Amino acid sequence: FLGCLVLTGYKHFKQGLSQAVPAVGIAPVPPPPAGAVDRYWLAFEGRTTGPHSTADLVAAMTRGDFPPESLVCAVGSTQWVPLRSIAS
């Protein structure tokens, strides 16, 4: 999830990852505005689960199920942020 290579065609795939073409000149995707997304992936204890709603994640954090520094990623994004950042 955290790093990507762009494979340009079957030829590069067949040659293996060592021959893959890295993504060049692509700007990072900014995180969506707060409140614009309601579904997140959750990374906790080496596993990724979800997608979960914002309300469910905030409730779980409030109960102590997940620490505020657990990482979440909005569906469709590649930016992982602390769970506490979506609890506004």
Image: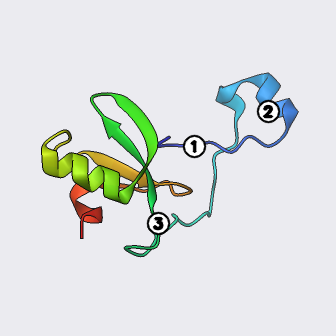
Residue 23 screen position, x and y as percent: 64, 52
At label 1, which amino acid type do we have?
Cys
Of badges 3 and 2, the one in the foreground is: 3
The relative height of residue 48 versus residue 27 in the rendered view (above or below) is above
Based on the displayed image, in which of its 4 quarters is residue 70 positioned?
Answer: top left
Given contact means CB atoms under 8 Å apart, are the residues at marks 1 and 2 in contact?
no
How far apart are the two marked residues, 3 and 2, measured between alpha carbons? 35 Å
SS label for mark 1: loop
Mark closest to the chain's N terminus, 1 or 2: 1
**Residue at 72% over, 24% down:** 16
Give the residue type that dot 3 points to: Val
Q: Could you tell me how far apart the alpha carbons at marks 3 and 1 are, in whole angstroms?
A: 23 Å
* 38 with respect to 6 (left or right): left
Q: The C terminus is located in which quarter? A: bottom left
Q: Quadrant of residue 76?
A: bottom right
Residue 7 shown left or right of residue 48 in the figure? right
Give 23 or 79, whichever is nearer the viewer: 79
Mark 3 / mark 1, whichever is N-terminal: 1
Viewer-side label of 3, 1: 3
Residue 21 vertical position relative to residue 39 in the rendered view, above or below: above
Residue on which the image places disc 3? 37
The residue wearing badge 1 is 4
Residue 35 placement (x, y as % from top left)? 39, 73
* Kind of residue sitting beneath label 2: His
Query: Please, is residue 20 above or below residue 58 in the view?
Result: above
Q: Where 12 sits versus 60, above or below?
A: above
